Image (tube, grey):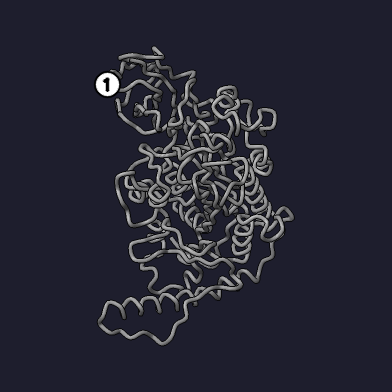
Amino acid sequence: MKRRNFLSILGTGAALPVMMNGLCVRAFASDTPFLSLLANVACEDRILVLVQLAGGNDGLNTVIPLDQYSVYKAVRPNIAVAETAALKLTNATGLHPNMTGMQQLFTQGKLRVVQSVGYPTPDFSHFRSTDIWLTASDYDKIIDTGWLGRWLDTQYPGFPAGYPNAAMPDPVAIQIGNTVSTALEAKQANMGMAFTDPKTYFNINNYGAGTQQNTRFLQELDYIRQTGLQIQNFATPVKNAAAKATNKSSLYPAANQNPLADQLKIVAQLIAGGLRTRIYIVTHSGYDTHSSQNNAGSGTPFSHPQLLQQLSQAISAFQDDLRLLGIEDKVTGMTFSEFGRRIKQNGSNGTDHGAAAPMFIFGSNVQSGILGANPSIPAAVTLEDNIPMQFDFRSVYASLFRDWFCVNESDVKSLLFADFPYLPIMKTSKPTDVNEQGESVNQAKLSVSPNPAMNEIRVRYISEGNPVRISLFDYTGREIEVVDSMTPQHGEHELSIDVSQHCSGNYYCRVSSSKSHSVIPFVIMH
């Protein structure tokens, strides 16, 4: 349902005494056909901003497990954040001391922390893991479309042919940078466009209308010319939007001092200028911190603490700008990185490629708080040990599709190729028991014994009467066994698991359902 169709149904005399932004119209959508139409129109105005932390962000130094501080400090003697310096979000969890801006957003109710996000079989290659996140594929499948490109293709069918047009005169997705993200790739074309400055817009020069000669080279050259002409047509609304609005926040640093802030400043300006673009992507590079993590090393312009300071400063300034410009209710932001880092520091005072890491969802429409428990650090950790996932990243995507862009659940499954549990991220999320830190099924409700174990473990957990998946992860954060997938009755249950075939070392048991997720470590000793 597009805006013009909605208005034609209502007629020119209809009155709309309802605010569309900042109101949970989706919750009433099933009550009447009118409110269903209203919800669809409201969702059309919503924007998602993705912040890619390129290189693999170290989650343990970003979101600090204060409830396990002594173990955390022991495995990171040279790079651990001082306990007294950590910025408290709760008594159990803190942020890096350079992230004051994001702590303030948390206090203001505009920041959601999602703990230990990853996927079942992590790939530690930058290129492959990035591809997995951008396409929402399984680790062993190659997909040639992006998770957002597939959705945008349903919203703007036939793109790029016939665009821009009266219904959509603006780019459907924008990447601030030189390369368009794979996340925006659709079957026919990439749905996005990239530039670094809307005022000095880069365009492909077009000479003539193409040759139309039947050779592969000339056909491809003709396609490039047509694409260039299309980009040129999109240039005018982009430039006009940039000229219409002026950033208002005083929190932005000076130009060229914070590369992420410079990008988000452009995004805020374009949104305020009236562009109807649905997706924006910005990139913050430098997170591959193998050595001298707390100090900028050779070839690394910024240390990890400096990167986190830039991240926090940029996002808090951007959110402040959106508020002052009067558009914050239509924008939600999300950070992601291709993987996290390992638990133990390496011999170069850095951290190597790891598995799961926290994500930040920010904006005035998020359910503020911490989703999930702090990652559990085993008592004895090797250089190979990783944090296993608590939440699959595709659950985050599914939740944003359903609760931010109002995609129906059958279409969400089609876009992501499978069902993934929804998470309470947005204020419009349906009721669920996966709530704030410490309220989901956690170590108080899940236990593994004996620990250490030799040949068998007994897993005790409480079921809410929903389908439950019980799986084991090894020390690398890889899911090695799905023990059971069932729908037990409500109440306490115990399951015996044979672990005699597994080598000695650190392991994790994960119990998850549509309403609860929990991970607990245990040790096997033969």
In the drawing, does residue 417 fall left or right of residue 240? left
Q: Quadrant of residue 16?
A: bottom right
Q: Quadrant of residue 74?
A: top right
Q: Residue at 59%, 28% (x, y): give it.
A: 77
In the drawing, does residue 317 fall left or right of residue 335? right
Q: Residue at 57%, 53% (x, y): give it.
A: 331
Up the image or down, 449 lies above or below 163; here it is above
Q: Position of residue 180 (x, y in %)?
A: 46, 62
For the view shown, which residue lies furthest in the bottom direction? Answer: 208
* Residue 364 visible, this orientation: no
Q: Position of residue 3 (x, y in %)?
A: 49, 63
For the view shown, which residue lies furthest in the right direction? Answer: 250
| Mark 1 secondary-structure assignment | loop
Q: Nearer the viewer, residue 285 or 112?
A: 285
Q: Quadrant of residue 487?
A: top left
For the view shown, which residue lies furthest in the top direction? Answer: 450
In the drawing, does residue 19 fall left or right of residue 133? right
Quarter placement of the N terminus: bottom left
Up the image or down, 103 lies above or below 164; here it is above
* Residue 282 visible, this orientation: yes
Q: Residue at 31%, 51% (x, y): give it.
A: 142
In the drawing, does residue 496 fall left or right of residue 272? left
Q: Nearer the viewer, residue 184 or 62?
A: 62
Up the image or down, 523 lies above or below 18; here it is above
* Amino acid type indicated by mark 1: Gln
Q: Position of residue 471 (x, y in %)?
A: 34, 27
Q: Residue at 41%, 75% (x, y): give it.
A: 227
Q: Position of residue 103 (x, y in %)?
A: 66, 39
Quarter placement of the C terminus: top left
Q: Which residue is mark 1?
A: 501
